[in-house]
Image (tube, rainbow, N blue to C red):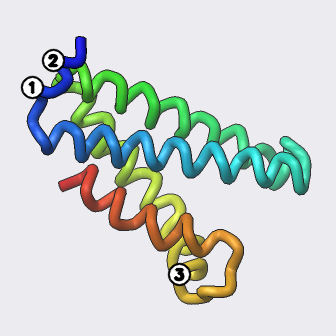
Amino acid sequence: MWARLKQKPFSLWVIAAGVFYLGLALLGLIVLLAIRMGFMFGGGILLLLLIFVAVFFIAGVFVLREKRWAYVTAAAVSLVFFFLNRTEISSTIANPADAFFWLGFSSVPALILVVV
């Protein structure tokens, strides 16, 4: 099994790592916000984020299996996530004292790498 994983191109690893990172970062954000403000915070915005997490993980698994539709799915979900959250990301990046600065500052390069 490990021999097959070593034969995969580096670009595949970059896409999969970016998608898995975004999924794990959002999962951490969901857990943190659910503990602080309840699971129905913001009218169910955490449920929408949970859907993004699931799609990121599914796309990551199938990218490692070299499915062509997974590349398109990973890029499309990354673009949709970025455009839906561009105002929050930009306001978070503008304020380094924000508690979620790490997420905004690290998710933009990951999104760019996945799309490219």
In this picture, residue 37 sits left or right of residue 24: right
Lower position in the chain sequence, tag 3 or tag 2: 2
Disc on res. 53 = none
Q: Let me know if residue 107 appears in the view.
A: yes
In this picture, residue 79 sits left or right of residue 44: left
Question: In which quarter of the view is residue 71 placed?
Answer: top left
Mark 1: amino acid: Gln
Mark 1 residue crowding within 10 angstroms, few (<14) / some (14–19) / many (20+): few
Residue on which disc 2 sits: 3
For the residues bearing labels 2 and 1, Cβ distance under 8 angstroms: yes
Mark 3 or 2, closer to the camera: 2
- Measured from the top left, where is residue 64 in percent x and y? 25, 26
Residue at 42% x, 25% y is 58
Residue on which disc 1 sits: 7
- Measured from the top left, where is residue 79 in percent x and y? 35, 54
Mark 3 residue crowding within 10 angstroms, few (<14) / some (14–19) / many (20+): some
Residue at 9% x, 26% y is 7
Mark 2: amino acid: Ala
- Determine whether the residue tagged by mark 3 lies in a helix, strand or loop: helix
Looking at the figure, which quarter contains the C terminus?
bottom left
Residue on which disc 3 sits: 93
In this picture, residue 65 sits left or right of residue 35: left
- Measured from the top left, where is residue 43 in percent x and y? 82, 49
Looking at the figure, which quarter contains the N terminus?
top left
Residue at 87% x, 48% y is 35
Residue at 34% x, 65% y is 109
Q: Let me know if residue 67 appears in the view.
A: no
For the residues bearing labels 1 and 3, Cβ distance under 8 angstroms: no
